[in-house]
Image: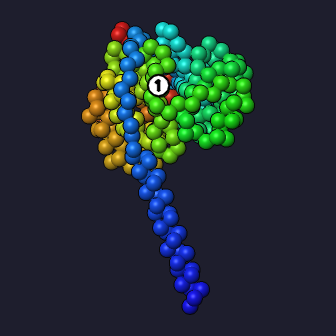
Amino acid sequence: MGNMRLKLAILVLGILLAATLFYFMFSQKQEIKYTEVKCGYVDLVEIIVLVDNYPNPLKPNLKTAWGISMLVKTSNVTILFDAGPSPEVLEYNCRILGVDLSEVDFVVISHEHGDHVGGLPYLAKVKPGCRVYVPSGMNSFTKNWIKSLNLTLIEVKETTVITKGVVILGELYGPPWEQALVVNTAKGLVVLVGCSHPGVVSIVDKAVKEIKNTPYLVIGGFHMVSCSRDTCIKVTEELLKRNVKFIAPIHCSGDTIREVLESKYSEHYLEAHVGTVVKVGEST
């Protein structure tokens, strides 16, 4: 009887500890701080999808891989947003697309997962010492690995203006901790997301409240591959309530939200995949 009471007490204690941990994690996830920033505008931004798991029917020679990487170019800066899962895929697609990563000014990594950082060894080969901005909450193993590549690691916690019109949106908790890249244009905010573990709507809300502009385009992974059609409709409606003009889900977004956008919200759907080029500016 004594042993059974002891086991029951341990079980209850374990449940209480788990509940406390869950409460702490949930509370941490929901605590979002907003800090208004002033960053100016860029006239034009060009985005090239270098790596994605969705093939391009017009460019079948490009390799696909589960991951994401996008090149972002403005008049005064060139940025690599995430690096995909493989240096070989990143190098191959860059060669086919005519992209020279030695021209990259800096890298923004959305979060620590391998399908977003795995291609960094290629970047390190062509641009040693390049600045790589990561969420401060990224695990130490991945941070140390990035440093070991002879890249310059810079941790970001709060929303940070990097150059005119270009902002790294401070980390939100998914898990894991994740940051986004935002380019401020006269047409509105261009929001690039890696996997949207904290929720794509939460990311857009943070961008709008901190940069004080209307969202124009959201592109990247929405982390909705297993979501129901009703959930995909709800998320789409929430984005449209925030006046998002175009929605371009790739990578982990899933087929369902792409089908929902194409069938129900075609005027807001921007189909994207590896090799897609998107330009946003006053003349586009």
- Residue at 58%, 23% (x, y): give it: 107
Task: Please state the total of marks drawn on the protein image.
Answer: 1
- 15 displayed left or right of 51: left
Q: Residues within 10 Å of mark 1 (few under 14, many from 20)?
A: some
Of residues 214 and 258, the one drawn nearer to the viewer in this rendering: 214
- Give the image's coloring scheme: rainbow
Percent x, y of residue 121: 70, 28
Residue 173 higher or lower than 7, as above or below? above
- 111 displayed left or right of 119: left
- Residue at 51%, 40% (x, y): give it: 177
Q: Quadrant of residue 98?
A: top right
Percent x, y of residue 79: 55, 19
Percent x, y of residue 209: 33, 30
Residue 99 higher or lower than 112, as above or below? above
Q: Can I make out residue 181 in this image?
A: no
- 167 displayed left or right of 122: left
- Residue at 47%, 67% (x, y): give it: 16
Query: Which kind of residue does numbered mark 1 sit on?
Result: Thr
Of residues 86 and 58, the one drawn nearer to the viewer in this rendering: 86
Q: Can I make out residue 112 in this image?
A: yes
Tell me the SS state at disc 1. Answer: strand
Percent x, y of residue 235: 34, 41
Identify the residue position indicated by label 1 in the image: 160
Q: Quadrant of the C terminus?
A: top left
- Residue at 59%, 34% (x, y): give it: 116
Residue found at the very far left of the displayed protein: 241
Q: In which quarter of the image is the N terminus?
A: bottom right
